[in-house]
Image (cartoon, helix red, strand yellow):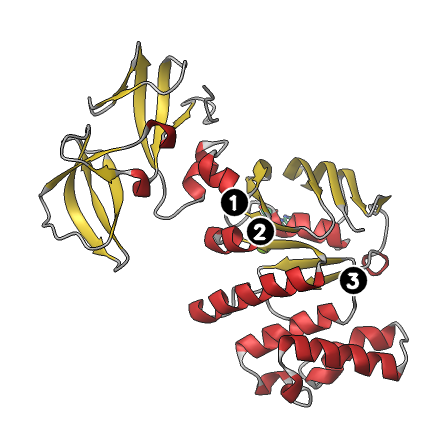
Amino acid sequence: MAEIKLTDLTKSYGPTEVLHHVEGEIKDGEFIVIVGPSGCGKSTLLRMVAGLETVTSGEIAIAGRRVNELEPSARDIAMVFQNYALYPHMSVRENMAYGLKIRKLSKAEINKRVEEAADILEIRQYLDRKPRQLSGGQRQRVAMGRAIVRDPQVFLFDEPLSNLDAKLRVQMRLEIRKLQQRLGVTSIYVTHDQVEAMTLGDRLMVLNGGYVEQFGTPIELYDRPASVFVAGFIGSPAMNFIPAMVEGDTMVLSTQAKLPAISSYRGAALLGIRPEHLTPDENGPIAIDVDMVEQLGANTLLHGKLNGSDHEMVASVPGHVSTETGAQHRFSVASELLHLFDPATEKRLEA
Ligand SMILES: Nc1ncnc2c1ncn2[C@@H]1O[C@H](COP(=O)(O)OP(=O)(O)O)[C@@H](O)[C@H]1O
Ligand SMILES: [Mg+2]
């Protein structure tokens, strides 16, 4: 059982604190994705779990044991990096076997583990090749294989797919997900890509400037984002935000459009509407003067200005929509799909 517990975890480089009071519990066998923009502290947090960075304050526990002072090799963790870190002069088999040789496993045991992992990853026919004789995707599999053969308690991945082209990335992320489900090893995966995070993670830890903004399932983050940051980060195209004033039973948008109030909150607010939640409706309160159309096949994105203002707005409508720039389209949106945030704290306003 390898649950991981992060308690009030802080990291400073010199006087600069880059991670602030990170809390989180990862269950045995769970696949967690740490997601956030570049520089928010994802790699630092992962490397602290691996033992490659010291902990400034707080505690990391793996399987109920404090590991702050343990060497990386004593933590029973395998890490897969973005650059694969393969030895160029060694064959695939030697690369995968290397860590096991150091741990002095028998030749027979090493061969068994390497061949099992090679079968799982479908790279058996490449075992005698050198890394340079492999494609990017195959190298990535070798790097995964090297982690699998160690049979660790925990897998850590730091943007392992970012060197691959878009199509291969999509394929590999499905493979990683299937592999993790099959092996059931507790995993932490770091990426800046929100789509990758949503497809891979049982739960996502959203980091922003070293703070945990929210830690929840993909659906929780999508349906009930805890902050403007999470709301804007999860979902594509990004959520529309419109300043509003809630007075009486009415929410008056900065563009003078009116919607019924959705909660008991009164006062200034930031209203969030996902593009895909705008429903075409001739009598709807939201009008977009379209100035750009993106035909994506499965859906159409209508970009434009809201209610004759200069406020940018985008709607995502299923299927093909034939329109021309300058045309006005009207929409309504179901109350339960609206999001309200405090304009000062940028936190979600609950009913
Ligand atoms: N060794 C280091 N010394 C000083 N600052 C560092 C060091 N490593 C990372 N940082 C800083 O810590 C912050 C988080 O970095 P990092 O964890 O690499 O972010 P991410 O992986 O999310 O892109 C950044 O501001 C970065 O400049
Ligand atoms: Mg990083």
Position of residue 141 measured from the top left corner of the image (x, y, whole percent): 62, 74
Q: SS of the residue at dot 2?
A: loop
Tell me the quadrant of the picture where the C terminus can be found: top left
Q: Residues within 10 Å of mark 3 (few under 14, many from 20)?
A: some
Q: Is residue 341 left or right of residue 94?
A: left
Q: SS of the residue at dot 1?
A: helix
Q: Which residue is mark 1?
A: 218
Q: Quadrant of residue 312?
A: top left
Q: Amino acid at mark 3?
A: Pro
- Mark 1 → mark 2, Cα distance in angstroms: 7 Å
Q: Nearer the viewer, residue 238 or 179?
A: 179
Q: SS of the residue at dot 3?
A: loop
Please say if 240 is above or below 299.
above
Position of residue 330 measured from the top left corner of the image (x, y, whole percent): 16, 36
Q: Which residue is mark 3?
A: 152
Q: Which residue is mark 2?
A: 201
- Mark 2 → mark 3, Cα distance in angstroms: 19 Å
Q: Residues within 10 Å of mark 1 (few under 14, many from 20)?
A: many
Q: Nearer the viewer, residue 98 or 316?
A: 316
Do residues under tags 1 and 2 come within 8 Å of each other at their CB atoms? yes
Q: Is residue 261 left or right of residue 169?
A: left
Q: Nearer the viewer, residue 67 or 185?
A: 185
Q: Residue at x 75, y 40 (%)?
A: 56
